[in-house]
């Protein structure tokens, strides 16, 4: 068996390269559908907060994904597309419920929650995207703003 690999290694390498090349044909599409209602445009946070959220969250949670070069290369292409699809499904800054104060307030609460638990942005993402790292001060600032914004929305709602 070992003899077989030693004698045929260049064919095995070639077959592996061909498989990898073939895999590239199956790369998932890199989509950016039209933005329906942008969170930052609707809620107008202070510029510093807007910059942070765009850098730390928008690649996975909006229709304005900046697709990195490695998202063209299988198997990374699959991992990146899966993150973006799942991210958009769970929380989408490009579909902000501007006409529904209750729903918008709940979404602000969820941003606050994932920051509080340090769940987002994911570590595997900030490892590469250093500009997406949030300092403690930035985290606090965003959380205070989401809290105040959610309260403001709730105070505008008619009593249940
Ligand atoms: C690398 C991609 C990526 C980045 C960057 C990212 N997220 Fe996520 N996020 C996900 C994925 C995938 C999920 C769904 C699975 C999960 O909960 O881990 C998710 C889930 C969420 C949820 C939903 C949790 C729930 O209650 O279901 C919220 C809210 C959220 N992210 C907010 C954020 C915020 C705010 C940022 C920026 C500070 C951010 N995310 C950055 C990928 C990302």
Image (cartoon, rainbow, N blue to C red):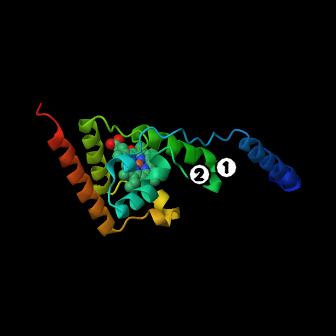
In percent of width and height, residue 115 lies at 31, 56
Q: Is residue 53 left or right of residue 69?
A: left
Q: Is residue 122 visible?
A: no
- Separation of marks 2 and 1 at Cα, in angstroms: 8 Å
Q: Is residue 118 visible?
A: yes
Q: Is residue 25 left or right of residue 47?
A: right
Q: Is residue 144 left or right of residue 134?
A: left
The mark lying in front, picked from 2 and 1, is 2
* Residue 160, disc: none
In percent of width and height, residue 57 lies at 43, 53
Q: Is residue 15 above or below residue 136?
A: above
Residue drawn 30% across and 69% down?
137
Q: Give the residue number, with chain letter if any, for mark 2.
A: 67
19 or 31: nearer the viewer: 31
In percent of width and height, residue 73 lies at 68, 50
The reply to whether dot 2 and dot 1 touch (C-beta < 8 Å) is: yes
In percent of width and height, residue 51 lies at 41, 61
Task: Name the element at disc 2.
Answer: loop
Indicate if the residue with disc 2 has its beta carbon within 8 Å of ligand 1.
no
Residue drawn 52% across and 39% down?
34
Q: Give the residue number, with chain letter if any, for mark 1.
A: 72
Residue drawn 46% across and 51% down?
58
Residue drawn 30% across and 35% down?
99
Q: Earlier in the sequence, mark 2 or mark 1?
A: 2
Q: Is residue 105 left or right of residue 27?
A: left
Q: Is residue 149 above or below residue 33?
A: below
The C terminus lies in which quarter of the figure? Answer: top left
Q: Is residue 81 above or below residue 53?
A: above
- Tag count in the figure? 2
Indicate if the residue with disc 1 has its beta carbon within 8 Å of ligand 1.
no
- Label 1 packing within 10 angstroms: few (<14), some (14-19), many (20+): some
Task: Name the element at disc 1.
Answer: helix
């Amino acid at each position: 068996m070992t003899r077989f690999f030693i004698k045929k290694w260049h064919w095995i390498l070639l077959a592996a390269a061909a498989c990898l090349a073939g895999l590239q044909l199956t790369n998932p599409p890199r989509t950016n559908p039209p933005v329906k209602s942008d969170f930052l445009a609707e809620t107008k946070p202070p510029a510093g907060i807007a910059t942070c959220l765009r850098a730390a969250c928008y690649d996975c949670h909006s229709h304005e994904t900046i697709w990195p070069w490695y998202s063209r290369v299988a198997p990374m292409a699959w991992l990146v597309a899966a993150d973006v699809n799942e991210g958009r499904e769970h929380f989408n800054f490009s579909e902000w419920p501007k006409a529904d104060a209750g729903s918008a307030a709940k979404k602000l609460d969820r941003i606050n929650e994932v920051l509080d638990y340090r769940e987002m942005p994911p570590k595997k993402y900030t490892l590469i995207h250093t500009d997406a790292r949030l300092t403690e001060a930035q985290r606090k600032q965003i959380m205070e703003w989401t809290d105040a914004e959610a309260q403001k929305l709730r105070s505008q709602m008619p009593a249940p």
